[in-house]
Amino acid sequence: MQRTTMIYVRISSDREGRRLGVERQEEACRALAAMLGWKVVRVYEDNDRSATREKDPPNYTAMIRACERGEANAIIVAKVDRLHRQLWKFAPFMKWRKQRGIAFATTEGDNTETSDGRFILNIKASMAEAEAERISERTRAAVRQRALKGEFHGGSLPFGIDGDRERVHDELRYVSFWHHTTDAPRVKDAVRRVLAGESVYGIAKDFGMQRRTLKRALTNPAIAGLREYNGEHHPTPWKPIVEVDDWQRVVEILSDPERGTKEFNQRKYMLSGLVHCRCGHRMTCGSSVRTEGLTYECGKDKGGCGGTRIVMKPLEDYIAEQVFLVLDTPEVRQAIAAQESGDDPTAELRKAISDDERALQRLEDEYDDDKLPEARYRRRRARLTDRLEANTKARDAALLARKRTNVPSGTKLRAVWNDRDNTWKRDMLTAVIDRIEIGPQPINPETGRLFTSAPPRRRGETEEAWRTRFDLHRAKVFSQRVTVTWLV
Ligand SMILES: [Zn+2]
């Protein structure tokens, strides 16, 4: 067989290595190649100091890749120890070259092409293998011991945990641990909120964190004071931030494959997306918490007119009340009963959505593993989320058409309303409401001035009496400000 060969030389920092200069290595290797009749393709050269101890030197790796691409079918080095700094690495190398039919020779007489040469090399390789086993046993034993003793295994600290490092046996190691002053409370808060049904996406947004970072932190046993080793849990050297039971429930919730879809639709506010300003802009939750709580605002920073604001909770109550009343009118009951349910037009959309969600997850994983440049990640993510949003909208519209046949009577709805979450409530609302428009604060015809948002309390008036008057006043104002476009 005609052999084409790579030559590999390495300058090592030890004295003998320096003596056996790189030129002499190359010269000897070329002479050997000529004697064997192998055609030299390329010479690869590495410097010992150019790589860490664990990693293979860069040009060694490049040579291996070139051989795998078929650019040569032999490798020549001066001595076996030129190939690898650690003897044990020689065994996997020999396996690799045998599988691919790559010849190997050294200027000391090792040669896989002769039976004597193969014999000697096999002995060297099995010695290397024995060394490898000893090393990995030692490493495994050390890791196991650390796990059993509840020591930190090294690397970066988990989210929520802080610590102090000290130099131990030539390396910096964490020796004491405590709860991180800002991250640990976040972990606690997030666990509580996930258990209460909130989406990781929403919580992460509140914290100014990436969803995947938070999800990873919450599913890490470290927050429950546990470390997984060989399928078993061992205690960590730090105190748990949350209860083990709570952590396990969070893991179950977050690994639910259905959750992806649910999360995407999870609504924080009952009326978001439905409430519009009279200027045509959609109103969103106000950034300022007023004395009366949250508001829907036509925010200037979000492209709105900035002129409209309405308190959230009273508006929600007002709308719900309208819905109960409307649903109990005979015309609406008839109209709902008349609508038929057909085949499921959402099946295809749902598949497209779950496919895209999985693609998004893969993309994030790739990005996490540093396999993707930032710009490309952002581009692809934007494309996926755009499509996801469009498909989700289309699916919601299709679902809506089916849902209307299942809307309960107003009386029934009123009875269960307060026990339901915002997503459910919103589903009901969007089944009957197309749009809610908020007008300006109306003018009081008696005074010719703007209605105040709250009537002043009269002298000697009881709290209860004032509240009743307040509610009436607000209902009057809302009836002028709020226009509901019904679907039924
Ligand atoms: Zn507006």
Image (cartoon, rainbow, N blue to C red):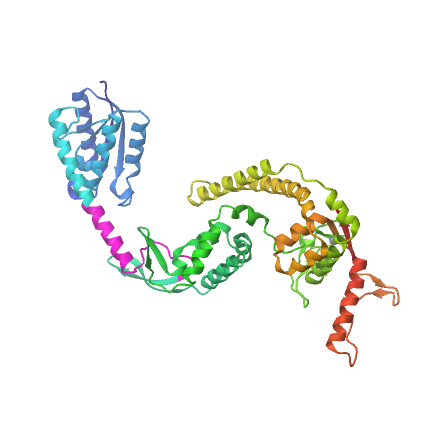
Residue 32 counted in the magenta span: no
Point out residue 72 in the picture as x, y percentages from the top left corner: 28, 24
Lateral position of residue 444 relative to residue 399, left or right:
right
Decide which of 78, 407 is in the foreground and name it: 407
Point out residue 230 in the picture as x, y percentages from the top left corner: 30, 50
Lateral position of residue 61 relative to residue 457, left or right:
left
Point out residue 191 in the picture as x, y percentages from the top left corner: 48, 59
| Residue 454 visible here | no
Rendered position, 267 above or below 387: below
Q: Residue at x 48, y 54 (%)?
A: 214
Rendered position, 238 above or below 216: below
Lateral position of residue 278 relative to residue 374, left or right:
right
Residue 141 counted in the magenta span: yes
From which residue to which does the magenta span run?
Answer: 134-161
Looking at the rendered structure, the number of numbered marks drawn on it comes to 0
Query: Residue reaching furthest top?
Result: 1
Q: Residue at x 79, y 58 (%)?
A: 481
